[in-house]
Amino acid sequence: MINQKQQTSFYLRRLMDMNKKIVMSGIRPTGFLHLGNYFGAVKNYVRLQDEFECYFMVADLHSLTTHPDTKELKINVQRVLSENIACGLDPEKVALYCQSHVHETAELYLYLTMLAYKGELEKTTTFKDKVRLQPENINAGLLTYPVLQTADIILHRASYVPVGKDQEQHLEMARNFANRFNHRYGDVFPEPQAFNFGDELVKVPSLDGAGKMSKSENQFATLYLSDDDELIRKKVMKAKTDSGPTVPNSSKPDYIENIFGLMKLVSSPEVISKFEEDYNNCTIRYGDMKKQLGEDMVKFISPIREKADAIRNNEQYLKEVMEKGAEKARKSARATMELVREVMGLNYF
Ligand code: TRP
């Protein structure tokens, strides 16, 4: 005879083996989405949603480590959800939820803090950066930020985590914490790996020719999905150019390469080859090129902006999305936590 507990555990383990690979990622609810976020992250989430079981989470608790004032939190959460849905994330296909709605996260985070060492947490690059940026508020949440992130990921026993390069160290720590747990208490967690599309990972260059688009750099060199048409055109027209090449088939300076790079993201192949030709035979007019790029950017961004605005103004819909997402995420979290408590020996009766 097997008892109830053994049966539950058998069922859970079988479920784990059967499941298709799980993808999990977190999105910070600070700042507006820009073109770099779109091509670097959101577009990949959208591609993954048909092939994998996906959990995409708004990291509202993480934001408390740097933004303890919660006045703006609701509006920021609503905005980030709206923008992601407008970009093509489908709340019917994925679990799209808020971190704070899945309380199991806090429990797993607690257990993991006992497996994380002060020394390794203090060495984390993001922690050191934040110590420098906010010396007046070096809270324990900031120190254990990677532990909470690990809890987010392994709570769903995720194998793949689509994130940018800046999150590599956090993921390495997640692997360490997951392995430490497995060795100490029993094999529960797969090792989470960064997921990217290899060569296809696109860098979106900034409009001022310096680096890539990012929210912290020059605001005018970054195109946001919330920018209105006039602002998009204005920003594109301000992009750095020069008087044009004088020798046929010469190589392009970085800032010109960047304009072509942006065109490749939103313009048609015919448009791109026309300007390539013009460049190569020294007849290119950058004013015309930027005008074209501006129009193509408007065509790309404005439907997303309009969709996001409509979703943001529909509180009832957003509420339903959050409820449904939290329900899916809790289901997966509950199954994991049953197993966690069992292997930890916390089931006393
Ligand atoms: N730390 C991530 C960032 O700054 C956000 C995040 C929170 C996350 N939890 C996560 C990313 C879990 C991937 C998986 O962007």
Image (cartoon, grey):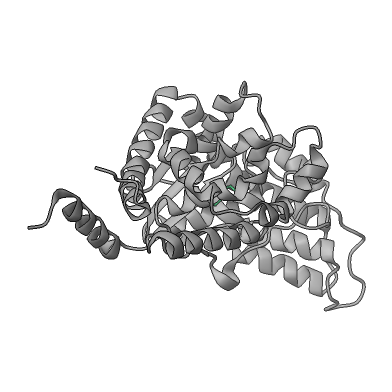
- Quadrant in the rendering for residue 143: top right
Instruction: Check the image and report above or below for 253 versus 64.
Output: below
Q: Is residue 297 visible?
A: yes
Counting from the top left corner in percent of width and height, residue 294 is at: 70, 48
Instruction: Check the image and report above or below for 146 versus 97.
Output: below
Counting from the top left corner in percent of width and height, residue 60 is at: 55, 35
Between 193 and 79, the one nearer to me in the picture: 193
Judged left or right of residue 152, residue 320 is left
Q: Residue at x 59, y 39 (%)?
A: 62
Judged left or right of residue 119, residue 313 is left
Q: Is residue 220 visible?
A: no
* Total numbered circles: 0
Q: Residue at x 67, y 41 (%)?
A: 142
Between 281 and 52, the one nearer to me in the picture: 52
- Quadrant in the rendering for residue 263: bottom right
Between 283 and 82, the one nearer to me in the picture: 82
Q: Residue furthest top?
A: 71
